[in-house]
Image (spheres, rainbow, N blue to C red):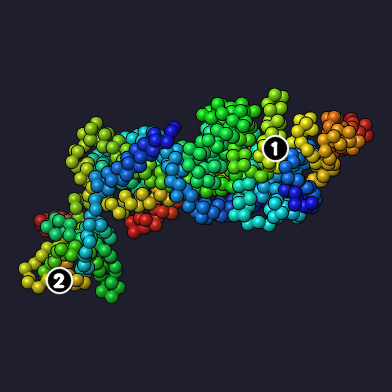
């Protein structure tokens, strides 16, 4: 193997190797996690967060506007406090409503933000007061069955 | 005849021997890093080793990657379609490859293809007194022979792992989209939605880089430390492959538990 | 007197894993001479060469080259010294991934900044001296044993060393190649004005080409002298070596219990049938 062909082969190898990395980065992965250059923190308290995870998406009108940064348990109020990293380009009114939804029947859980009509905006480190907890499937199912059973008893004379 | 005292003595000696070798290997690693100047300054030396351990491993890596991807595509589809979510095939194939199979299988293949070749080359140079001759010519064999091979391996490994994953994803796509008929758009968009650049891809690259350091170090050390006979070299090659495989799997567990801790 | 000594060895001792290999060697090797160190296999000859080249540190004693003590030097000084030494290894130790030309050019490229054209001339000169200019493009694995040894010799003298060391240069060669190597060793030594130390057990070839011979046995110098004296020596060890006698001061048998005992004859005679 003489020197110039060797260089050619090494060059070829490095080029397709870097090409593969680029392919993985651009075509396979998404930059969503990194793309947020500037962000600010919003807090929200929930009675029950269900299966919400750190790094889960925060969406408004279906568009990802941030990520869940931290989840902690407030031992005084027995509530979950969720910290969200919101893209600095977006601001939300003070009376924004935060709910925990599930994508699909068994999919990941995410936080949905529904803006209210107030003029005043939420500042960084602000807290969202109007929240709705996750819908826990087991609860819903048992409630449904319980109601059905109750209905059955009423109709019987 | 069973003699418990003799057995214990044997085990103890084995443990001491291994700890001893670990110490020698660590000292060798430091010496290797300190004398890496030549390998980087005279980069054609390292370039030749990238050719030796990278280019020569291309075929096995690409073909294995393709087959692993094909299998992942078949198995993944079979499982996912039971839950009616065959569109998630892309996600499953990509995540398995990027996080685990790419770095680990490419690492194992790299150890058996390039690692064993590096050990054989250095061991043979030692057995035929080429290293001693070089040393007598006032040329440091660690700087001139060992360091370029080490760095060649370290540079090649992440590239090979990325190629393995790419080929695997292509294989999964081939089976899922072309042969079975999963929707092309869903395959890619689901994949992109759930594969995170930093979290999944960079962690995978980091894993393969760590494996590259481990395998290359084991390979050059076993070669340099081999008994200078034909038998000694062949034993060193076996040790390279076995030790590398164990190191890759153990390191994989440690790295995974660090990287994806919040999931558990 | 000591000015014309190139290598001077004083009371050199070397232990390998607690087992003494060399137990007090004294040697004086004058400039310009070819000196042979002889002895049976495994008597520590090669260890001695390694000590002179600074690859092994003796347990006690001193090795002086050019008056400087090798075994007290730092690594950088040893490397500086080795640039003025050449060594021919038992089987040549050519770099198998380099061609004959590149093998001989190796020391020049590593240690000098000479332009490629000049390196080419120097390499061809050295190859011409060993008669293998025509083999420059061959790879080492296509050379015969004798040719490989000659290429290695060209490589050893590439930097015109002051001291050339030979580790068993005659091992495994046919009689013709053996004669060729012997003549080359003598000719190169005289042409370069170098000094040569040759470790070997080939007595007949050595008697022809060397100026002085040391005999080593059991880690000590047991006899020494010019070839003429050696030929007529009455020393039993030298006689055994020169005339290749099987038994003598170097015993044919490895120490063992009496043969009868090993065969169980003594035991069988004493005990009843079992």
The residue that mark 2 highlights is A122
Q: Work out which quarter of the rendered image holds the C terminus of chain A and state it.
A: bottom left
Question: Where does label 1 land, which residue?
Answer: C190
The chain to which mark 1 is attached is: C
Q: Residue at x 68, y 57 (%)?
A: C72
Relative placement, left or right, of C135 versus C24 is left
Closer mark to the observer between disc 1 and disc 2:
1
Judging from the image, mark 2 belongs to the subunit labelled A
Whole-percent x, y for residue C144 in the image = 61, 26
Considering the numbered disc 2 on the image, is that residue within a helix, a strand or a loop?
A: loop
Q: Is residue A9 above or below residue C11?
A: above
Cα separation, mark 1 vs mark 2, equals: 95 Å
For disc 1, the neighbor class at 10 Å (few under 14, some 14 to 19, many from 20) is some
Q: Residue at coordinates 53% horizontally, 28% vertically from top-left?
A: C138
Residue C3 visible in the displayed image? yes
Asked which secondary structure carries label 1, the reply is helix
């Amino acid at each position: 193997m003489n020197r110039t062909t060797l260089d050619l082969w090494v060059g070829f190898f490095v080029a397709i190797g870097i090409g593969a990395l680029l392919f993985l980065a651009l075509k396979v992965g998404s930059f969503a996690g990194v793309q947020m250059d500037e962000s600010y923190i919003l807090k929200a308290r929930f009675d029950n967060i269900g299966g919400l995870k750190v790094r889960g998406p925060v969406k408004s009108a279906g568009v990802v506007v941030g990520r869940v940064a931290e989840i902690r348990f407030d031992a005084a109020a027995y509530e979950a406090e969720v910290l969200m990293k919101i893209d600095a380009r977006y601001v939300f009114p003070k009376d924004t409503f935060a709910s925990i939804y599930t994508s699909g029947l068994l999919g990941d859980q995410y936080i949905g933000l529904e803006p209210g009509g107030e003029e005043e905006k939420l500042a960084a480190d602000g807290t969202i007061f109007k929240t709705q907890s996750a819908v826990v499937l087991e609860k819903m199912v048992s409630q449904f069955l319980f109601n059905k059973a109750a209905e059955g008893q009423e109709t019987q004379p | 005849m069973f003699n418990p005292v003799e057995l214990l003595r044997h085990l103890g000696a084995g443990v001491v021997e291994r700890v001893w070798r670990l110490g020698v290997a660590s000292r060798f690693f430091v010496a290797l890093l300190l004398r890496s100047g030549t390998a980087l300054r005279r980069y054609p030396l390292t370039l030749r080793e990238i050719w030796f351990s990278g280019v020569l491993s291309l075929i096995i890596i690409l073909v294995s990657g393709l087959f692993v991807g094909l299998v992942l595509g078949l198995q993944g589809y079979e499982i996912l379609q039971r839950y009616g979510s065959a569109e998630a095939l892309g996600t499953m194939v990509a995540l398995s490859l990027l996080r685990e199979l790419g770095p680990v299988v490419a690492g194992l293949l790299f150890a058996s293809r390039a690692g064993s070749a590096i050990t054989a080359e250095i061991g043979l140079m030692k057995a035929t007194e080429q290293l001693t001759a070089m040393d007598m010519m006032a040329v440091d064999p660690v700087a001139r022979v060992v360091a370029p091979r080490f760095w060649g391996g370290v540079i090649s490994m992440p590239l090979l792992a990325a190629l393995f994953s790419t080929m695997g994803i292509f294989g999964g796509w081939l089976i899922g989209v072309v042969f079975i008929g999963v929707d092309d758009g869903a395959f890619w968009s689901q994949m992109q939605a759930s594969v995170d650049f930093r979290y999944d891809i960079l962690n995978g690259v980091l894993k393969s880089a760590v494996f590259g350091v481990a395998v290359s170090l084991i390979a050059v050390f076993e070669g340099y430390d081999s008994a200078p006979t034909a038998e000694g070299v062949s034993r060193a090659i076996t040790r390279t492959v076995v030790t590398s495989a164990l190191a890759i799997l153990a390191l994989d567990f440690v790295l995974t538990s660090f990287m994806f801790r919040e999931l558990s | 007197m000591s000015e014309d000594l190139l290598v001077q060895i004083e009371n050199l001792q070397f232990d390998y894993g607690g087992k003494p290999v060399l137990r007090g060697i004294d040697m004086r090797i004058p400039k310009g001479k070819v000196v042979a160190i002889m002895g049976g296999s495994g008597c520590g000859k090669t260890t001695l060469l390694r000590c002179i080249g600074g690859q092994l540190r003796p347990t006690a004693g001193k090795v002086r080259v050019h008056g400087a003590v090798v075994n007290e030097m730092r690594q950088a000084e040893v490397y500086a010294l080795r640039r003025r030494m050449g060594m021919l290894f038992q089987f040549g130790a050519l770099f198998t991934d380099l061609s004959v030309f590149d093998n001989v050019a190796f020391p020049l490229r590593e240690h000098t900044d000479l332009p490629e054209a000049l390196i080419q001339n120097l390499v061809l000169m050295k190859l011409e001296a060993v008669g293998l200019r025509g083999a420059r493009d061959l790879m080492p694995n296509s050379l015969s044993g004798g040719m490989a040894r000659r290429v290695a010799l060209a490589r050893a003298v590439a930097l015109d060393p002051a001291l050339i060391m030979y580790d068993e240069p005659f091992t495994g060669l046919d009689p013709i190649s053996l004669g060729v190597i012997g003549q080359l060793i003598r000719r190169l030594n005289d042409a370069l004005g170098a000094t040569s130390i040759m470790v070997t057990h080939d007595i007949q070839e050595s008697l022809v080409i060397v100026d002085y011979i040391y005999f080593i046995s059991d880690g000590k110098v047991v006899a020494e002298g010019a070839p003429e004296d050696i030929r007529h020596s009455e020393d039993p060890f030298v006689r055994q070596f020169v005339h290749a006698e099987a038994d003598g001061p170097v015993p044919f048998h490895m120490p063992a219990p009496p043969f009868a005992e090993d065969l169980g004859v003594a035991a069988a005679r004493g005990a009843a049938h079992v």
